[in-house]
Image (cartoon, helix red, strand yellow):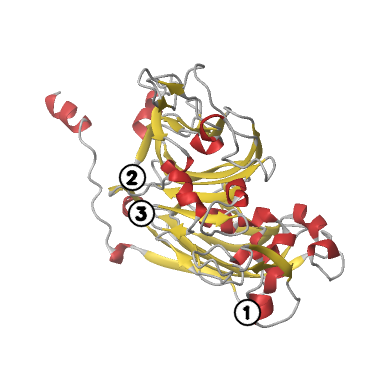
Amino acid sequence: MGALGSSQCQAPDFGSPLLTKLKTFAGGTYEDFDGYVYAANETVIFSHKVRSSASAGLMTFADFTSGKNNVGRFIGDNVIIRYYIDDDVKPLLEFVPGAAAGSFVHLEGLNYYTTKYDPRTGGPGSRCQPVRGPEGVYCGMDLVDSDSNDGGFQPWMTKWSGKLGPEGSWTLSFRIPFSNRIRITAQIDPSILSQFTAKNGYSGPPLTTANAVTHLFSIFRGVEGDEASLGQLIKLGGAAMPPIKSWNVRLRLLKLESFPVKPLDFVPLANISIDDPDVTGGALFMTTTNWRAGTLEAGLASPNVQGGSIEGCWWALLSPDQELKPGMATPMGSGIEDYFGDSYGFGYFSKIYHSDISGLSHVHNGVGAGVKVSSFSWFSAYRYFDNDPVTFDKRFFLTWRNGAATRTDPAGHTTKCFLDEGGQGGGSNQIIDSYVWVYTWKDPALASEQVTI
């Protein structure tokens, strides 16, 4: 009994992976391939099945390049990518590449992509000309997310994702595990087709699901091998995942799309309940959130009690015994920017930044010195947790509150981040879009305990 009890208290050592035990696979769409993606239906752009029943697979790289000039970039940025894992008939992952990399710039719309940046005013200028060359390649408000504040495109890359070329280029190095097979498809989002009008800078024939098409160049790579070695290749905070097949390790994407939020609402960015039969635990990998104010004049820092929406705090529930009540939830950030490791309204939105921990990836109408109302009205930011592991047991809930519940202490100082109903505070109406990437697993020992005879 003593030996058995001791082993149960120790984490299993699955060893370090050896390159000699891993086999690389790759594929995608190239110049000599069809490579066309349609709005009418999904197109399979990659598939792979592991070569041995004793092995599992791990996707390690994806690159998406589509759409020349600003109109083509807009289409490419709105191509929906779907990952089907093993025998699933529904995609486990469904995303657009830019938002997966950390920027929701695609939500700005076609008019934004076809409008020049004016460095004199620090905002939109005249219409881009539909010509080849630099005027077409580098023209568009979607490319002004740089700290140069001159409208010029600035390549960026973190450990996990980035955009290195202006022409619809997005790269992901996410670790996506699967047990037997994987299938990846692409499809133009049909909902964008109504934007292709002269009013938005489009001069071609009307686009419908019957004729909307774009060329997508893509490259995918991964490795297959024994499940313990692949688990060692997915590390958060230096700690490895368990064997990916027997523990059913999955990378999940939890999304909010155009989610309306009123002042002091709690936004359910992620919610994995204790009732999920495929989850006994997991860890947070990445979050990307986009804020759009109900009106550009309101913004996040509207004239409101104690600073408005940007003062909103973050919490997580990491186990079944935690509740969203005072003293019970895990604090994650004391303001929007604090969660992303920044301060004071992202330096009042004066600089775009990217790092392996976090980044301010998109700011409506660009950044610049001084406070621009438009900057506070619409922006995206991302945060990785691979160096700062946030693990959970059986359930996971992540929330941001639209504005802070504030109080004044006896000394006259303002305090905030209260979870009860007391205090003042609030912000303006917001529209939230978010991607929350979470690894989950199912402990086979705990799963077997649930089986009754």
Residue at image location 44% in from the left, 27% down from the top: 417
Quick one: label 2 or label 3, which is nearer the N terminus?
Answer: 3
Image quadrant in which the C terminus is located: top left
User: Residue 241: where, in percent of width, then height?
Assistant: 34, 46
Give the label on residue 116, or none.
none
Under tag 3, what secondary structure? helix
Mark 1 crowdedness (10 Å alpha carbons): few <14, some 14-19, many ≥20: few
User: Residue 248: where, in percent of width, then height?
Assistant: 43, 42
Amino acid identity at mark 2: Asp
379, 45: nearer the viewer: 379
Which residue position is annotated with label 1?
A: 31
State if disc 3 and disc 2 touch (CB < 8 Å).
Answer: no
Q: Is 200 located above or below residue 331 in the figure?
A: below
Amino acid identity at mark 1: Glu
Give the label on residue 388, or none.
2
Amino acid identity at mark 3: Leu
Quick one: label 1 or label 2, which is nearer the N terminus?
Answer: 1
Which residue position is annotated with label 3?
A: 230
Question: How far, Cα to Cα, is label 1 from label 3?
Answer: 32 Å
Question: How far, Cα to Cα, is label 1 from label 2?
Answer: 40 Å
Under tag 1, what secondary structure? loop
- Residue 88: image quadrant is top right
Residue at image location 45% in from the left, 64% down from the top: 157
State if disc 3 and disc 1 touch (CB < 8 Å).
Answer: no
Q: Is 145 located above or below residue 178 in the figure?
A: below
- Residue 75: image quadrant is bottom right
Residue 229 appears in the rendering? yes
Q: As drawn, is 293 to the left or to the right of 396?
A: right
